[in-house]
Image (cartoon, grey):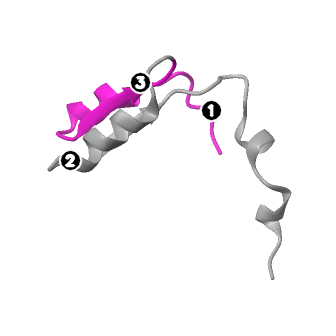
């Protein structure tokens, strides 16, 4: 894991020739996903979430277990 700070991935994707769709409150996710699926280009759907959550806090404790 790494701390990327508040990067705006949509314009970054567009800068390399992909589609970039920012999604966050209050914009719903579904229209962004529908636009991505209809695109003829690789597409990044940048879903903005809370910056107070971390990967460690939202990852299941089962991730490290091997069966």
- Is 16 drawn above or below residue 62 in the view shown? above
Residue at 65% x, 24% y: name it: 50
| Quarter-of-image position of residue 53 | top right
Specify start and end residues of the magenta stretch as a single range.
1-25
Mark-to-mark CA distance, 3 and 2: 22 Å
Circles 2, 1 touching at the beta carbon (< 8 Å):
no
Query: Within 10 angstroms of label 2, few (less than 14), some, or many (20 or more) residues?
Result: few
- Percent coordinates x, y for residue 57 in the rendering: 80, 40
- Percent coordinates x, y for residue 56 in the rendering: 77, 43
| Earlier residue among tags 1 and 3 | 1
Does the magenta segment cover residue 19?
A: yes
Residue extending farthest top: 26
Q: Which mark is residue 8?
A: 3
| Residue at numbered disc 1 | 3
| Earlier residue among tags 3 and 2 | 3
Direction from residue 64 to residue 51 in the image, left or right:
left
Query: Within 10 angstroms of label 3, few (less than 14), some, or many (20 or more) residues?
Result: few
| Quarter-of-image position of residue 49 | top right
Query: Within 10 angstroms of label 1, few (less than 14), some, or many (20 or more) residues?
Result: few
| Residue at numbered disc 2 | 38
| Earlier residue among tags 2 and 1 | 1
Which marked residue is nearer to the observer: mark 3 or mark 2? 2
Residue at 17% x, 39% y: name it: 17
Mark-to-mark CA distance, 2 and 1: 31 Å
Residue at 21% x, 41% y: name it: 18
């Amino acid at each position: 894991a790494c701390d990327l700070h508040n990067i705006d991935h949509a314009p970054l994707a567009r800068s390399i020739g992909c589609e970039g769709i920012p999604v966050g409150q209050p914009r719903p996710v579904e229209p962004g996903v529908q636009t991505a699926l209809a695109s003829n280009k690789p597409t990044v759907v940048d879903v903005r979430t809370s910056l107070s959550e971390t990967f460690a806090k939202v990852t299941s404790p089962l991730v490290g277990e091997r069966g």
